[in-house]
Image (cartoon, helix red, strand yellow):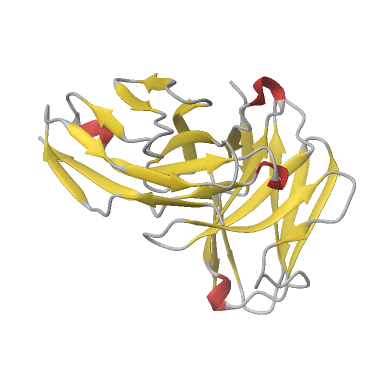
Amino acid sequence: GAVVSQHPSRVICKSGTSVKIECRSLDFQATTMFWYRQFPKQSLMLMATSNEGSKATYEQGVEKDKFLINHASLTLSTLTVTSAHPEDSSFYICSARDLTGGSYEQYFGPGTRLTVT
Amino acid sequence: GDSVTQMEGPVTLSEEAFLTINCTYTATGYPSLFWYVQYPGEGLQLLLKATKADDKGSNKGFEATYRKETTSFHLEKGSVQVSDSAVYFCALSLGTNAGKSTFGDGTTLTVKP
């Protein structure tokens, strides 16, 4: 089946620094990827839709200047958390759509645990 | 807008018990429906899916049937195991909206030996 990887799986950074998280579709091409944020014991909150070769579409309330998304190729999207603060600590999950089959199925990465100290 | 409502948890069962987790949805179009499972510290894994009315998705002993008349997609398993302990998310996805998925709040299942 389709596989999506994320790197790193865990990252600890100091307040004020920036962190980049990579999301890769390993065996299929993904024109669209999604970035989610998940707080402990809560559901996934969609942050943005990443479109290959164009600007990301952000959900209401998500700061686009703080969460920079780049989707430069059909297999790679990156999320950069700029000037991170402790409240940005969370579990970040990406997913990629496989356009075959017409079911709009999403394949999820294993997640990245970000801790800002 | 589109929404998914899941049975509130947590759910605690003994091994070999019968499991039902209710899921209902509202959607502006004709969605595909999914159940995802999340084990501690991991991302989501697709458990099963159904793309049209009366379809039954099944995997690893879990089943769910797409009921358009009741807008439901309840998850069932006849005999749960300790290894089934996880968080289960019901979700829908439409062809519109760039295929964005709408998730339920998740139901935590704990199976005790």
> Can you give x and y, in whole percent of width and height, for residue B100 in the image?
64, 46
In the image, taking residue B17 as reference, residue A101 lies left or right, namely right
> Can you give x and y, in whole percent of width and height, for residue B6 in the image?
34, 49
The one nearer the camera, A3 or B88, is: B88
Q: Examine the image and state in which quarter residue B42 appears.
A: top left
The one nearer the camera, A52 or B105, is: B105
Q: Please identify the quadrant where the N terminus of chain A is shown.
A: top right
The residue at 70%/42% (across/down) is B96
The residue at 62%/25% (across/down) is A2
Q: Please identify the quadrant where the C terminus of chain A is shown.
A: bottom right
> Can you give x and y, in whole percent of width and height, for residue A53 in the image?
90, 46
The residue at 31%/49% (across/down) is B107
Up the image or down, A77 lies above or below B18; here it is: below
Q: Is residue B72 visible?
A: yes
The one nearer the camera, A98 or B113, is: A98
Up the image or down, A105 lies above or below A81; here it is: above
> Can you give x and y, in whole percent of width and height, for residue A33 in the image?
71, 44
Q: Is residue A117 visible?
A: no
The residue at 60%/41% (across/down) is B29
In the image, taking residue B95 as reference, residue A39 lies left or right, namely left
